[in-house]
Image (cartoon, rainbow, N blue to C red):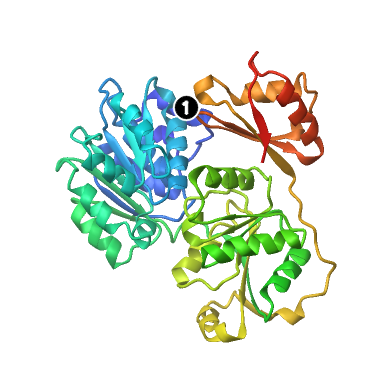
Amino acid sequence: MNFSKLPLTQAMLTNLDALGYKNMTAVQAEALPSVLEGRDVMAEAKTGSGKTAAFGIGLLHNLDVKKFRVQALVLCPTRELADQVAKELRRLARFAHNIKILTLTGGESFGKQLGSLAHQAHIIVGTPGRVLKHLNKESLSLENLNTFVLDEADRMLDMGFLEEVEAIMGYLPKSRQTLLFSATYDEEVKSVAHKLLDNALHIKTTSVEKPNVIEELFYKTDDKLTTLVKVFSLKKPKNSIIFTNTKLEAKELAEKLIERKIDALAIHGDLEQYERNDVLVQFANGSTPILVATDVAARGLDIKELAMVVNYDLPHTLETYTHRIGRTGRAGAEGIAVTLYENYESEKAEEYRADAKRKFLDADSLEALPEIEMKPEFVTLVIEGGKKDKLRAGDILGALTGEAGLAGQDIGKIDIYDRQAYVAVASAHIDKAYKYLKNGKIKNHKFSVWML
């Protein structure tokens, strides 16, 4: 199970060790030997099972760095997942100089992407719609492609990307390696796999992967909001994602929670890309404890330590339920999944009773505890400077713990993007940090700063 058993370069093994990749996960151990050989692979593996490294290490190992052409394409269902995959690939690519990884997703400037493509890239990570647009406009060429990856294929097809994926397939060279990863394989996924794969190795690690430890509670109620607040008072989760079935309900529920002194943000399909980024960064860095989301908006969101998932609306399918609650109870931590349903939904709720470990309770059984206030641990500051300005996380940390006089534990997560940086600061010290950054300098430069 050790990476040193694989035929990897010493430079890559050293980098993997530095990144904390000690032993392979089940999907990595089963997939990587064949991926490195160039064989097609169809893998069924849980979200969070280490599949990015399972294909990433292979496509980076097989890359000809001196050949500045697109050699690998990774398709993802959402912008957030594409960003997450690209970020992880860049970490894995540190073993070699000048490996260029480019993201092509919707919501970003098409013209800016044209400029980046003009300078070529080794690896493209993107969403189907935007990748297809570049292929149609001939701003992206796949003639030198040797590896094609379809990540979270089931989510991709759930979201209606089948036509785009099939159109992209028409641009792929016949001689190539194809890697297909999915948490589930229904008939639609199998149909796409049949068209894409040639003599593929089939891997299924979902049965050997350690299941998430999740307490599943179902509450029948005639007042979902009051029951939700009672659950928060009783369980006191550090953070939670609440799922609704509509964009409007997500927005309205976040507003109602704020009225109840529970800090919340909503994410849904009507937000502009910069608004989505702001919301996701704040939830990931602890600047808001509650995220209210629709299924589509939350796909690709990776929060490693999520205390609770709430189904404010019953999911449309059991698969959606599994996908929602699978975000909590990861990496050995215990999670809680709460599902609320009203009397008229009782028949649909009965479908979930087949699993004996799910507890069905009446909301009236919840104690009438004092209503809880849920305030964020951190507040996020946005700095108008990023990678393009040679700004690093260490520069921001140094400025705040140096001249500004904050302690290291008062600074939370720092996210650096091309033109902006986000820094989480403990709520008690936010005014001090804001005042310094507004009037002071980072690396002898003044940057505009504001509070989210």
| Residue in front for this viewpoint, 181 or 227 | 227
Residue at the (69%, 45%) spot, across then down: 287
Place of residue 37 in the rendered image (x, y in percent of width and height, measured from the top left): 26, 38
Residue at the (81%, 75%) spot, across then down: 367
| Residue in front for this viewpoint, 88 or 358 | 88
Place of residue 166 in the rendered image (x, y in percent of width and height, measured from the top left): 22, 54
Residue 243, visible in the rendered structure: no
| Residue 343 to residue 74: above or below | below
- Left or right? Give the position of 397 relative to 415: right
| Residue 350 to residue 146: above or below | below
Q: Residue furthest top?
A: 444
Place of residue 450 in the rendered image (x, y in percent of width and height, measured from the top left): 67, 34
Classed neighbour count for the residue bearing mark 1: other residues with Cα under 10 Å, few (<14), some (14–19), many (≥20): some
- Left or right? Give the position of 251 relative to 166: right
| Residue in front for this viewpoint, 405 or 107 | 107
Place of residue 100 in the rendered image (x, y in percent of width and height, measured from the top left): 37, 27
**Residue bearing the label numbered 1:** 15
- Left or right? Give the position of 42 relative to 388: left
Q: Residue furthest left?
A: 174
Residue 373, visible in the rendered structure: yes
Q: Secondary structure at mark 1?
A: helix
Q: Residue 219 occupies which quadrant of the picture?
A: bottom right
Image mark count = 1
| Residue 318 to residue 394: above or below | below
The quarter of the picture where the C terminus appears is top right
The quarter of the picture where the N terminus appears is top left
- Left or right? Give the position of 402 relative to 444: right
Q: Residue furthest right?
A: 370
The amino acid beneath tag 1 is Asn
